[in-house]
Image (tube, rainbow, N blue to C red):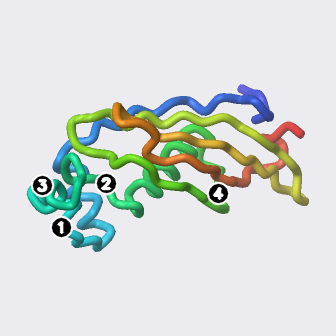
Amino acid sequence: MTTKPIAKGDQVTPLDLQLTPTRVIATSIASRDFMPAHHDPGFAKSQGAPDIFLNILSSNGYVSRFITDWAGPEAMVRKIAIRLGVPAVPGQILRFTGEVVATRHEGDEGVVEVAIRAANDLGDHATGTVELSLPVGAVAV
């Protein structure tokens, strides 16, 4: 079965991530980020946050997962460049969306640039771009 090559304008399959206190705390611990704002609600609120919140390493990891789940097992993430906005807090869904903004060939690789957005009820949590490579036949130019 052949799949259509990835082309500029293609939409990335959205990912809805349910944030729970366990997920926020576990991902912070897994990335060795022991900042109290990621596991202590009282501390987070004293700093002006609505609750504990996802750390940057976890946000980056979920951006990578979002892209590779869509692009498939041959995809190699080359670069993630995101800017954080509102906190990603428990009790909300973090919705990842994206669109292919550029494609090119470099030798035997196809290179894809995707504009991404991860948002919740508070607004944009992360925005930016991801660059990935795939076999040249998987990418339309």
Specify the label residue 41 is tagged with. Answer: 3
User: What amino acid type should be assigned to the residue bearing mark 2?
Assistant: Leu
User: Which is nearer the N-term, disc 3 or disc 4?
Assistant: 3
User: What amino acid type should be assigned to the residue bearing mark 4?
Assistant: Met
Graded by Cα atoms within 10 Å as few (under 14), some (14 to 19) or many (20 or more), the crowding at tag 2 reads many
Mark 3 vs mark 4, CA separation in Å: 36 Å
Specify the label residue 76 is tagged with. Answer: 4
User: Which is nearer the N-term, disc 2 or disc 4?
Assistant: 2
Mark 1 vs mark 4, CA separation in Å: 33 Å
Of badges 2 and 4, the one in the foreground is 2
| Residue 100: percent from left, percent from top | 71, 38
Residue 82 higher or lower than 9, as above or below:
below
Specify the label residue 54 is tagged with. Answer: 2
Mark 1 vs mark 3, CA separation in Å: 8 Å
Graded by Cα atoms within 10 Å as few (under 14), some (14 to 19) or many (20 or more), the crowding at tag 4 reads some
Mark 2 vs mark 3, CA separation in Å: 12 Å
| Residue, disc 1 | 36
User: Which is nearer the N-term, disc 1 or disc 3?
Assistant: 1
User: What amino acid type should be assigned to the residue bearing mark 3?
Assistant: Pro
Q: Relative to 2, is 55 on the left or the right?
A: left
Q: Relative to 48, is 81 on the left or the right?
A: right
User: Which is nearer the N-term, disc 1 or disc 4?
Assistant: 1
